[in-house]
Image (tube, helix red, strand yellow):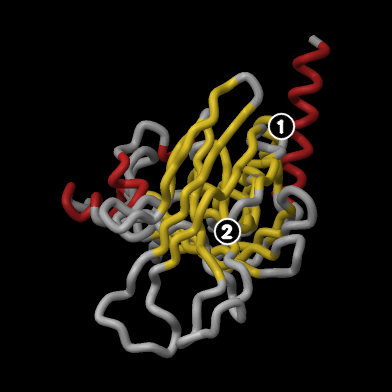
Amino acid sequence: MQQRRRSSAIAVMVALAGGMGLASAVCAEPDERTVSLAAHESARGSGDAVLSVDEVSDSRCRTAERCSASEAVSRDAAVQLTLRAADGRRYAATLAIGAGRDQPSPSAPAFARMGDQLVALVDIAPAGRELPADGPGRVQRATLRLTPADRVLVQQGATTVLPRAGFDLRVVSIDDQRCPNGVACITAGHVQVDVELSAKGAPAERMVFGAPTAPRRAQTWRGHEVVLCGVSPRQTGPAAAGSTPPLQVDFFVSRVPAVRRGAPAAQALAEPACAPIVR
């Protein structure tokens, strides 16, 4: 009886938050938040990160439209997001889901790596495009899952501890063969990063990111996904030896996104690595 009362109290608080135009949030598991946001609403992630919904759009068919099967499959629902990270940087992303809850969207991925947050679109409700018969009270809300991640910058030869993932990451070597800025090259070139991952009680493992023959930007280890977001700075023209700042590798490490578990590797490679910073 006491457990039932506690559950009822939580449900009432969530309902009141939604009715007052505030973001409703439910803790799914430690350090993970599930929020429900309409357009122009915001919610806090871990630390001081703030996630805002800029726009919610839904072209999915409703029963009254009597869409054909092929037309229904081609439609999706999307949400445009902005995240202000704790360091003040702002990131933008568009997430989408297909006509069915488990159907991928043809236009955008269902999750994004924004700052140090893994943001996944779970659902948009009520579902379907707006119809003339709908009144002004129909407000669509996006259910979003925010999971904190390790976001680190690592120089060659340095080792960093990933507190959330629970293992260490060392950049063994960086081979930067990219075309310098301001130089006309036949090809864009590539950058290859060799990494060593290690954890207490487990043998270390080497991984290669960005190899020219089989470029990889995302790999999994011990239930986590290690993503290469970028390598900076990029050389600018013919530079004298020693005048270029040391290279830093930007990694995003999180639990494997639930929407991608079991997905083929080709699908992971087709997804954007990390959401861009809003200039």
Q: Is residue 116 above or below residue 136?
A: above
From this viewpoint, which residue is outermost toward the right?
2
Q: Residue furthest front?
A: 241
Labels 2 & 1 near each other (Cβ < 8 A): no
Front-most of residues 58 and 85: 85
What SS does tag 2 mark? strand
147 sits to left or right of 31: left
- The quadrant holding residue 279 is bottom right
Front position among marks 2 and 1: 2
Whole-Å distance between the Cαs marked 2 and 1? 25 Å
Residue 89 is left or right of residue 134, and the answer is right
Q: Residues within 10 Å of mark 2 (few under 14, many from 20)?
A: some
Residue found at x 34% / y 51%: 269
- Please indicate, yes or no, whether residue 55 appears anywhere in the rendered image: no
* Residue type pointed to by label 2: Asp
* Residue 190 locus on image (x, y percent): 36, 65
The structure residue drawn at horizontal position 75% and vertical position 25%, both measured from the top left corner, is: 8
Name the amino acid, label 1: Pro
Q: Which residue matches tag 2? A: 250
- Quadrant location of the N terminus in the rendered image: top right
Tell me if mark 1 has few (under 14), some (14-19) or many (20+) residues whose alpha carbon lies within 10 angstroms of its own: few
Is residue 90 visible in the rendered structure shown here?
A: yes
Residue 10's tag is none
Q: Is residue 37 above or below residue 187?
A: above
Image spot of residue 62 (x, y percent): 33, 51
Disc 1 marks which residue? Answer: 30
Of residues 193 and 103, the one drawn nearer to the viewer in this rendering:
193
Q: Secondary structure at mark 1?
A: loop
**In this rendering, is residue 224 above or below 105?**
above
Q: Residue at x 38, y 54 (%)?
A: 271
